[in-house]
Amino acid sequence: MKKKNRKILMLVLCVLFVTGARAQTKIYSWNNLPVITEPTFKKDTFNVLKYGAIADGTTINTQAINKAILDCSKKGGGVVLIPGGYWLTGPIKLQNNVNLHLQKNALLQFSKNFDDYKIVEGIYEGKPSARNESPIMGTNLINIAVTGEGVIDGNGDAWRMVRMSDLTESEWKAKIATGGILSDDKKRWYPSEKNKRGHDNNISFWLDAGTKLEDFEPVKDFLRPNLIVLNSCKNVLLEGVTFQNSPAWNVHPIMCENLTLRNLFIKNPDYAHNGDGADIESCKNVLIEDSVFDVGDDAICIKSGKDEAGRKRGKPTENVIIRNNTVYKGHGGFVVGSEMSGGARNIFVYDCTFMGTDKGIRFKTTRGRGGVVENIYIKNINMFDIVQEAIFFDMYYWVKSPKANEKVEIPPVTEATPVFKDVFIENIACNGANKGIFVRGIPEMPVNNIHIKNLSLNTDIGVEIKDAKGIYITDVNLITKNNEKELVYIETSQDIVFNNLKTNQKSGTLFNINGANSAGITIKNSNIPKNFTKAAFNNGASAKALVVN
């Protein structure tokens, strides 16, 4: 009897364990999107005018605004109201249960006096680093928001180095007239001697062992802050306002949970170095919707820490919805990486438009990062006048890549080897790009299991695939300009399948297949013009690599 009871108990425990494991590992899909919890606030309102704030564009209101925020939080939370007007301030610290609300015609501009910002420990590219205080910041908070219809301006022009070639002649003259320092060749402007010293000496921001914050004082002005940084916060809402003119990145939530960005206008000059829009780092349960981005670097970017520090943190960005957004200028419309060492998964991007970005959909990483990027779903994306590639996967970010068919030493796979896999892209229309699709893995870890379907790509060049495995492209119309170049270039790749391929070209070469280990290159259900050469086989590639159905 005892043995029977023991068996029953073990069976019950097994069932409970399996049920619990399944509950912790949710399977998301287009029919089962992640759910994001938004913060709620009391209606109690704390007007900054009652705390002595003055909207004259010259009075520094740092103390009054922070006092209103702290008082609101201590009394159980509510709304801190910034009325219409021109409010100048230093750094603002958000507090629990506070909604910082900017009324229409409110301009909240941050001081360009570098001494108003202390050097603090922050995060730069996923690693602990020395930074100046962010204009808006919050750490370990719950139920916080920045909402309204006003403008939040980081006065980034005062912080940024800029090249003469980035400006018009009149803009350059105006910039010099503000003061600052020029480079020896007179082609680069720096806001201060400390800024120039940091740039000229290529100073690292990172806090290595034994490095102290005070060690950075000689280059303090070089440590440009992000406009708003929220670290380890829960239930966060950013809605309605304009974030613009950031010294570095605009919006940087890190290790936050239940984060909503809605109806924002995020803006930086196109020459703004590191002028990213929203960098979502190691966050869980995220919604970005109905927003407009016009920036100088990546627009909507998914990150999770860099190299060993990111892997040790071990927090992926996961369970993300990105929808109904418009991106103008930017290095990429939707971007993953390159700091993705903690991984990224369960990300759904749909109903977005990218116009004039350098790249459209962009995945980037490099050896040493590690991290697994998987279960990424993208659909209904419109692109226009993309400068480079419409769809882009690259595992050689910021390092020299091998030349075509160059023999290289292949390192072993370790925890520092990055992974791109299980990405599903559909319903893409692009009118104008240099290249339609670019996929480049690394020999030891090819880009793997990428499904792309229902594409209309009007580009100069068609498709280029290197070091990839399991790339499935279905229902694609490649409208290219260059009929002297092959439509599809493939190098050292396997199981590359084109199903229902169409082209505007009447002649030329369909595939240029390279490498002895290229295999399983398949084209089926495609009506290719008779004047096309189906394939050229080079650098050891065999005719057996191609299967025509």
Image (tube, grey):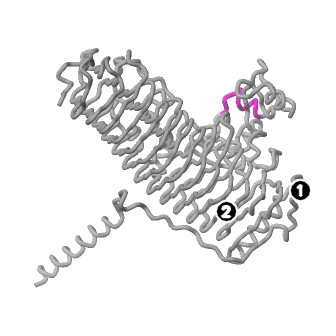
Say which of 15 and 51 sits in front: 51
Q: Which residues are magenta?
A: 195-203
Residue drawn at x 35%, y 57% is 29
Q: Is residue 314 visible?
A: no
The image shows residue 362 at horizontal and vertical percentages of 47, 38
The image shows residue 499 at horizontal and vertical percentages of 26, 36
Secondary structure under tag 2 reads strand
Which residue is label 2 attached to?
147
Label located before the other in sequence (2 or 1): 1
Q: Quadrant of the N terminus?
A: bottom left
Say which of 411 and 503 sits in front: 503
Q: Is residue 29 visible?
A: yes
Amino acid type at image mark 1: Asp
CA–CA distance between discs 2 and 1?
Answer: 22 Å
The image shows residue 145 at horizontal and vertical percentages of 64, 64
Question: 339 above or below 14?
Answer: above
Q: Main secondary structure of the magenta part?
A: helix
Task: Rate crowding at label 1 as few (under 14), some (14 to 19) or many (20 or more) other CA atoms within 10 Å.
Answer: few
Total number of numbered discs in the rendering: 2
Secondary structure under tag 1 reads strand
Disc ID at residue 56:
1
